[in-house]
Structure formats: structure tokens, C-alpha cells
């Protein structure tokens, strides 16, 4: 078994459109924006990659020294871990790693994670959260 990164389900929802990924943490109402290389890295992690596979896929897609990519991946994974967006899971024996990135060789823009909390109260009032016999709208109890 190989330890790979995975999204912390079921509280994490995400969508990637035109090279930008938006992630919403339904447990705490924060949302995140990832652009270009960070969006690509998120998709690779969502497919179940190790840190080494993520570095290799980014090196295939972006032009940068290996050390720069490894350092950026370490910071990216630390940020995602700090925000509790990812977790370790085991890859089943024989399960293939995520597909390699198509060769683009664009300049490496880094792996920034942009965090926003301005919609937390609105997300907690959303009917997706904790609707019971009291109906909606009802604010979820404080956690």
C-alpha cells in the first residue's frame, strides 16, 4: 500500500473551470481559490497522488528547477494540511498513479492558496447544513 493525498470528504467540495479551482469547506464555511499551477496540483491530488508524483507531474507541465517545484509543493501541501483540506489515504495495490500532465513547459507560477472567510455566515445558513424538523432557515448550532 502507498500513502497518497486525498480530499477530506465529505465536507470539501470543489470545481475547476478555465484553470481556476474554487474549494469550499462546508464544515467551517471558508472557501479557497487556486490558479494555474495550484489548480493543476489540486486536480492531481484529487486523483490520489503522492508528493513525489505531484512534483513529477508539475515538472512535466511547468518550466522550473526541480528544487523550486519541490519547495513549492512542500509549502502547498503544508497549507492544504493546515486548512484541513487534505488527508492521507492508502492506494490499493495495483491501482495506477494519476496520469502524467501533458507537456506544456510554461513558466512555473508557484502554488498559492487564497483563503476567504467572508461568506462563512451565509454558508452556515444554507439549507445544505443541518436542516431538521425546525425547518429552514435555522442557523446551525455553534461547533
Image (tube, rainbow, N blue to C red):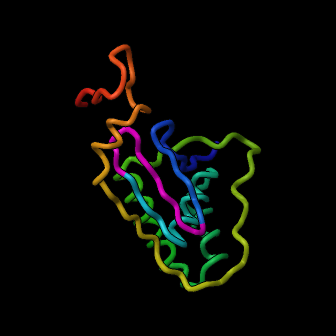
Q: Position of residue 38 (x, y in %)?
A: 50, 67
In the picture, which quadrant includes the N terminus?
Answer: top right
**What x and y, as percent, mark residue 7?**
52, 46
Answer whether residue 77 is magenta in the image: no
Residue 59 on image: x %, y %:
61, 76
- Residue 53 horizontal side relative to residue 21, left or right: right
Q: Is residue 72 above or below residue 143?
A: below
> Which residue in the rendered view is the most extreme toward the top?
133
Q: Which residues are magenta?
A: 18-30
Residue at the limit of the structure toward the left, as seen here: 142
Residue at 30%, 26% in the rendered image? 138
Q: Residue at x 50, y 36 (%)?
A: 10
Residue under the image location 44 percent in, 59 percent down:
77
Report the front residue among 4 and 120: 120
> Does 1 sit above or below residue 80?
above
Where residue 101 appears, x then y in whole percent? 69, 69
Q: Count the marks: how many?
A: 0
- Front residue (pair 122, 106): 122
Amino acid at each position: 500500500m502507498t500513502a497518497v493525498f486525498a480530499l477530506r470528504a465529505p465536507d470539501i467540495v470543489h470545481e475547476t473551470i478555465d484553470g481556476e479551482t474554487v474549494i469550499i469547506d462546508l464544515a467551517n464555511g471558508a472557501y479557497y481559490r487556486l490558479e494555474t499551477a495550484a489548480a493543476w496540483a489540486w486536480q492531481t491530488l484529487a486523483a490520489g497522488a503522492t508528493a513525489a508524483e505531484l512534483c513529477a507531474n508539475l515538472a512535466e507541465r511547468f518550466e522550473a528547477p526541480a528544487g523550486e517545484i519541490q519547495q513549492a509543493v512542500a509549502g502547498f501541501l503544508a497549507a492544504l494540511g493546515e486548512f484541513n483540506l487534505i488527508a492521507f489515504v492508502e492506494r490499493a495495490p495495483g491501482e495506477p498513479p494519476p496520469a502524467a500532465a501533458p507537456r506544456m513547459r510554461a513558466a512555473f507560477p508557484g502554488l498559492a492558496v487564497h483563503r476567504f472567510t467572508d461568506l462563512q455566515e451565509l454558508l452556515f445558513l444554507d439549507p445544505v447544513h443541518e436542516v431538521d424538523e425546525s425547518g429552514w432557515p435555522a442557523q446551525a448550532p455553534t461547533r
